[in-house]
Image (spheres, grey):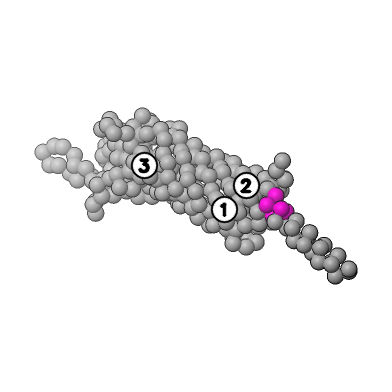
């Protein structure tokens, strides 16, 4: 009888474990960091004409919705400064044309919403992957068109309002809520409009962004 009672108690305990593991918990927090971005495949690159990485910040909020001991869903809302740098050789007009180097950068500011599936690999590390959509807030071109001509103007209308792609990476979590993460965004759309104004120098291309972040999640609350 005693053995039957112990066995029944053990079964009841085991039966509660999956339910406890599946009880969702919600944590929310803030994050920020740096982007290393460029626009790929939109510029006819040579040894003299090429794109280069542009650094910029990102800042926003995140939510972690736990789906068990190993899985979670993590949507985020981030304001992100992206874009690209360009180095281009130009020739000044005149009786003796001079070859000049023109360096300029385009800054594209997005409101990004990644939705990530998060798989915990242990107490510290996790991998994250999912889709991301971004809405262009503004675009600005700044730099030199030649040694004697500078440019600093809005180019928002030269770029598409919507960008979508895939993002993924790895994160490390520490008590009580510190998070460090490294992520790569692979844009699926050419961000330039079909017929931009040539004066905008909107070479376009696909967003490629390395994102390094630090964040903090508040203690979990059981979801209702």
Please tell me how crowded label 3 is: few (under 14), some (14-19), or many (20+) other residues with Cα within 10 Å. some
Residue 172's place in the image compared with 77, above or below, is below
Does residue 152 appear anywhere in the picture? no
Region of the chain picked out in magenta, as a range:
19-23
Q: Which mark is residue 189?
A: 3
Q: Is residue 212 left or right of residue 162?
A: right
Magenta part, dominant SS: helix
How far is mark 1 from mark 3, CA to CA?
25 Å
Q: Which residue was labeled with disc 1?
A: 118
Q: Say which of 37 and 114 sits in front.
A: 114
Please tell me how crowded label 1 is: few (under 14), some (14-19), or many (20+) other residues with Cα within 10 Å. many
Helix, strand or loop at mark 1 = strand
Q: Residue at x 65, y 54 (%)?
A: 68
Q: Are marks 1 and 2 in contact (CB under 8 Å)?
A: yes
Helix, strand or loop at mark 3 = strand
Among the two numbered marks 1 and 2 on one chain, the one whose residue lies closer to the N terminus? 2
How far is mark 1 from mark 2, CA to CA?
9 Å
Q: Is residue 221 left or right of residue 193?
A: right
């Amino acid at each position: 009888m005693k053995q039957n009672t112990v066995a029944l108690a053990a079964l009841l305990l085991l039966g509660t474990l999956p339910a406890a593991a599946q009880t969702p918990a919600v944590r929310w927090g803030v994050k920020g960091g740096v982007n290393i971005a460029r626009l790929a495949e939109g510029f006819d690159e040579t040894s003299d004409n090429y794109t280069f990485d542009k650094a910029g910040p990102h800042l926003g909020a995140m939510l972690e919705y736990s789906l068990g001991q190993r899985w979670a869903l993590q949507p985020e809302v981030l304001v992100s400064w992206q874009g690209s740098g360009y180095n281009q050789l130009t020739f000044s007009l005149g009786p003796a044309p001079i070859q000049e180097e023109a360096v300029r950068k385009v800054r594209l500011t997005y409101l990004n919403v990644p939705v990530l599936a998060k798989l915990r690999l242990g107490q510290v590390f996790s991998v994250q992957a999912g889709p991301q959509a971004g809405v262009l807030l503004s675009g600005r071109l700044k730099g030199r068109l030649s040694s004697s001509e500078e440019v600093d103007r809005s180019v928002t209308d030269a770029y598409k309002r919507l960008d979508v792609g895939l993002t993924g990476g790895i994160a490390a979590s520490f008590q009580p809520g510190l998070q460090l993460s490294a992520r790569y965004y692979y844009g699926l759309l050419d961000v330039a409009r079909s017929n931009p104004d040539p004066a905008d120098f909107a070479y376009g291309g696909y967003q490629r962004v390395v994102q390094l972040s630090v964040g903090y999640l508040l203690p979990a609350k059981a979801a209702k």
